[in-house]
Image: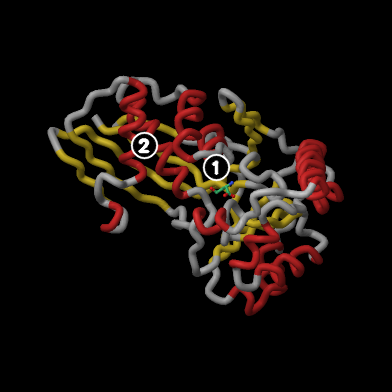
Amino acid sequence: MKVKVKVPATSANLGPGFDVAGLALTLYNTFTFEIIESGLNITGCPKQFCNEENMTYQAFVAGAKACGLEFSGLSIECGGDVPYTRGLGSSSTCIVAGLVGAFAFKDQGEDRQTILELATQIEGHPDNVAPAIFGGLTVSVMTDKVTTLNIPVKHDYRFVTLIPPFTLSTEKSRSVLPQQLSRADAIANVSHLALMVASLINGHDEGLKIGFGDRLHQPYRGKLIPGFEEIMAILGKDKDVLGCYLSGAGPTIMALIKAEDTKGVVRIKEELGHLLDGWQVEKLELDMRGYTCDYE
Ligand code: HSE
């Protein structure tokens, strides 16, 4: 028996919601697991990741321990389109898939809250793994457990995903953040996040235009991304771009438009011109399911 797990890419933070807010996108990685007699056989990803350090394998081992699965050896076939180290949750796809794969061999692959708790322990924060698990747009709070809720979004949005040709590791991107914030910056972020969530629920375009503002991470991380300030300023002037933010730890930049703005991608490309040289531009939608798990 094989277990096939498909996990959506995610975009975390959404501006002010650092380590809190995230959304799932219609871009996927797939992982097919098979228990074999012995050893570890990983295919479909760069050679340097085909060993016991592999994140998906590590998550599978953690999942097996948590659900009491014993296995002699494992084969993992990886595939999909989520770019690596670009701020689109590729590591979350690996973590979620590994855990779900192990639980699925025990018929427990749909226990999403348990997967969330374990995935958050591994990742350290829930903002990417939560939407990868539940789909949609989520906010999460960590106490002695992880509490995640979906935001019911009023309008049909599209996510214009600007993916640079260079990578930025989460480790480096977190290392430039200050250890402490002023009260004014803390209030700015709390208020912007509240406004952004309320605007998404109510379909309030003017609130969204303000609500994606952030003073906690983007001002620091932006300096690591050539063209960041310029791109954000140009997107900010486009009246039909309802919000723009650094996706996850970056370097991808996300612009939110309405579904009916069918010329949005062409317009944004024109506005940004040479600033997008070498960048990949994708128009994505919200994935509303989160991971899927099938038996083959
Ligand atoms: N909230 C995380 C960060 C997402 O911004 O560092 C990337 O793991």
- Say few, some or many: other residues with alpha carbon within 10 Å of mark 2 (under 14 / 14 to 19 / 20 or more): many
User: 79 or 116: nearer the eye?
Assistant: 116
Residue wearing tag 1: 128
Q: Residue 266 location, x and y as percent? A: 67, 68
**Residue type at mark 1?**
Asn
User: What residue sits 50% from the left and 69% below the top?
Assistant: 165
In front: 205, or 260? 205
In the picture shown, does residue 7 fall above or below 175?
A: above
Q: Position of residue 276 (x, y in %)?
A: 60, 73
Q: In screen coordinates, is 206 left or right of 53?
A: right
251 displayed left or right of 65: right
On the image, which quarter does residue 74 sit in? top left
The residue closer to the viewer here, 185 or 38, is 185
Quarter of the rendering occupied by the C terminus? top left
The residue sitting at 65% across, 41% down in the picture is 21
CA neighbours of label 1 inside 10 A, class few (<14), some (14 to 19), many (20+): many
Look at label 2 and name its amino acid: Ala
Task: Say which residue appears at 48% left-offset and 40% top-offset.
Answer: 123
Question: In the rendered image, which residue does mark 2 sit on?
Answer: 59
Q: Looking at this rendering, what residue extends furthest in the bottom direction?
A: 274
Q: From the top left corner, tell me how far across and down residue 219 is, in percent.
A: 70, 60
Q: Indicate which disc, 1 or 2, sits on the residue closer to the N terminus.
A: 2
Q: Is mark 1 within 8 Å of ligand 1?
A: yes
Q: Is residue 209 above or below residue 290?
A: below
Badge 1 marks a residue whose secondary structure is loop
User: Which corner quadrant holds the N terminus?
Assistant: top left
59 left or right of 19 in image: left
Element marked by disc 2: helix
* Percent position of residue 255, x then y: 68, 57
Q: CA distance from mark 1 to mark 2?
A: 15 Å
Which residue is found at the position 77% from the left and 45% from the top?
Answer: 186
